[in-house]
Structure formats: C-alpha cells, structure tokens
Image (tube, helix red, strand yellow):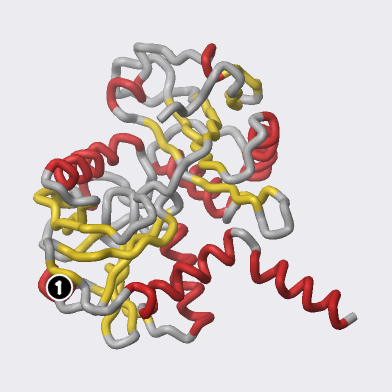
Amino acid sequence: MAYYNENTVLWLDGNIVKASEAKTDLYGQSLHYGYAVFEGIRSYRTAAGATRIFKEVEHYDRLRRSAEALNMPYRYTTSELIEATYDILEKNKLQDAYIRPVVYGPANMSFSPNTESYTVIQVWEMAPFLGEKLLRVMTSSFQRPNPKGFKIEAKASGHYVNSILASQEAKAKGFDEALLTDMNGFIAEGPGANMFFEKDGKLFTPAPGNILPGITRATVLEIAAELGIPVEEGQYTIQQLKTADAAFFCGTAAEVIGWDSIDNTKFPTPWKDTTGRRIQQAYMDRVTEQQHQTAKQTQLATA
C-alpha cells in the first residue's frame, strides 16, 4: 500500500512538510529502541458531508499521557494538535482517513532522558484494517508481556513488536488474525484491537490490567449501555470463548469486525443475528453521525 505520493504533506512540529521530503535522524532513540508513542485516529465523512475526527480529544489526551508515562518531553495542547489535524486533512483533501500522530526522540544512543522530542501528524486513506469478512482467528503462541515490565497504559511503539509477531504467525498459518492471552493464560486482546464475545445475549470482555483498554472499547461499552446490553468484564479462558455464541474485535483501525471462528471452532450464531452486529451498526452510525443527521431531518420535517 502506498501511504503517500508526491503531493502528500504532513505536519511536523508546526511546519507543513512534503511527506517525500521529510527526514528522521538515523541515530534517533526511537528508531534504535522503539522509544516513541503514537495514536491511531480516524476521521469520517459524516452523513451531512462534513469531516469529523472521532473522539479526537480522547485520542490526543491519551497521546499526552503516553508521552508522560515514558518521560518524553511533550509541548503541545490537545486543542493545538486537533486544529493541526483538521488542517492536514484539508490540505491532503481527505475525509475518510486514518490519522497517525507520533511523538519521537532525537539522536540519543544512551538511555539518559531527552530534553526534547518531535511530533509528527500523518494522514492517509485506509481500507478496512482487518477486511470486511468474518475473521478466522487463532490463539497465538505469543502472550501479552508482563504488565509490570512496561507502562501498559501507554501506546508505545516498541510494545507493538509483540503484536506484529502474533499477527504474522497467525497469517503464516492460514488465519486472518491472532488472539493473545496474558501471562496467566487468560484471554487478553488481538494485535492492536480489543475483543468481546457474547453468550445468551450478554457481552464479555477482558478486564483492564493486562490489556490496553482502547478508546473504541470504551465506545462499545457506551453503546452497549445505551442499548441495554449487559456487559461483564473479567478473566476468561480460551475454552470459555469456544462455547460462546459469537465474538468480535474492536479498535480504531479495525472498527467493529466479527469473527467466524477461533482455532477452527466456528461460532454458532449467524453474525447478522448477533449482539455484535447491533454494536457494529450502532458504531458506524455514531462515527458518521448518521443518527444525528436522521434526527435533524425529522425535526425539519415536523417543524
């Protein structure tokens, strides 16, 4: 996939730079040690035709918390970065887009603290991250790292080597994606996505502690509460998952995407009849402001 062309621009510490001309230091601490933090954010063309970044405040607030957790200098406010993001989307003529802000370090081959860091915002068009068909998922041989070994609440670049290895393993074995367990063998999350499963109309999801509790995960919990769908957070085994009616991943890139099976054990309930499908539709309505537009049209028609 081509992420940029000769016309693409990005935002780099307040400057608009052509992506093809942007540079980074090959002696950078982020390149050598994975010492950087990032966010994955989406913007959508709404039902009214406007460009809207979904939960932009939550994402940029988390970027700041991630930088602080890793002791990285951080000098921008959330509102400044949101404004910069809308600007870069407009300059690249994008509405339905993926947004990747990164805070990264300067040249530093030691482990001593940095006195400065750099911030870049890149945007590009992205097809559905995990596709649009139901996923064949396998239990990975890789586990989520011990949460005492790093700041689990930080979205740090180096942490994602674990995700890459798990995803590559699954695809090499003919599956669509992986499911990682925690160090105790309980279900944790996918590579870059949280997960839910359902049984008898109730949703279950791994509790915080060994996962990155995502912003999309929080949105799913909000939607479930609004729809009156009960949700339980806890520790669950792969065997419990294999007796579920259905399951799905959720994440900014993945959005909400259903599973066909886990370790070749198919889920019995057709996806169209699942609670997950209701959540999926409600999520897409929310990010595109479809319900808001429908309500506005109704108000105008009855005025």
Q: Position of residue 223 (x, y in %)?
A: 50, 74
Q: Residue at x 51, y 43 (%)?
A: 64
Can residue 146 be seen here?
A: no
Q: Position of residue 94 (x, y in %)?
A: 63, 38
Q: Position of residue 22 (x, y in %)?
A: 52, 15
Q: Nearer the viewer, residue 221 or 127?
A: 127
Q: Quadrant of the N terminus?
A: top left
Q: Nearer the viewer, residue 145 or 6?
A: 6
Can residue 129 be seen here?
A: yes
Above or below 181: residue 87: above
Q: Which residue is mark 1?
A: 242
Q: Amino acid at mark 1?
A: Lys
**Image-quadrant location for residue 149:** top left
- Tell whether 32 sits left or right of 165: right
Mark 1 surroundings within 10 Å by alpha-carbon count, few (fewer than 14), some (14 through 19), many (20 or more): some
- Tell whether 145 sits left or right of 20: left
Q: Nearer the viewer, residue 223 or 126?
A: 126
**Number of numbered labels in the structure image:** 1
Q: Position of residue 27 (x, y in %)?
A: 35, 12
Q: Residue placed farthest to the right in the image?
A: 303
Above or below 36: residue 200: below
Q: Quadrant of the C terminus?
A: bottom right
Q: Residue at x 60, y 50 (%)?
A: 44
- Tell whether 216 sits left or right of 246: right
Q: What secondary structure is found at the residue carrying circle 1?
A: loop
Q: Residue at x 48, y 13 (%)?
A: 23
Above or below 275: residue 259: above
Q: Residue at x 58, y 65 (%)?
A: 286
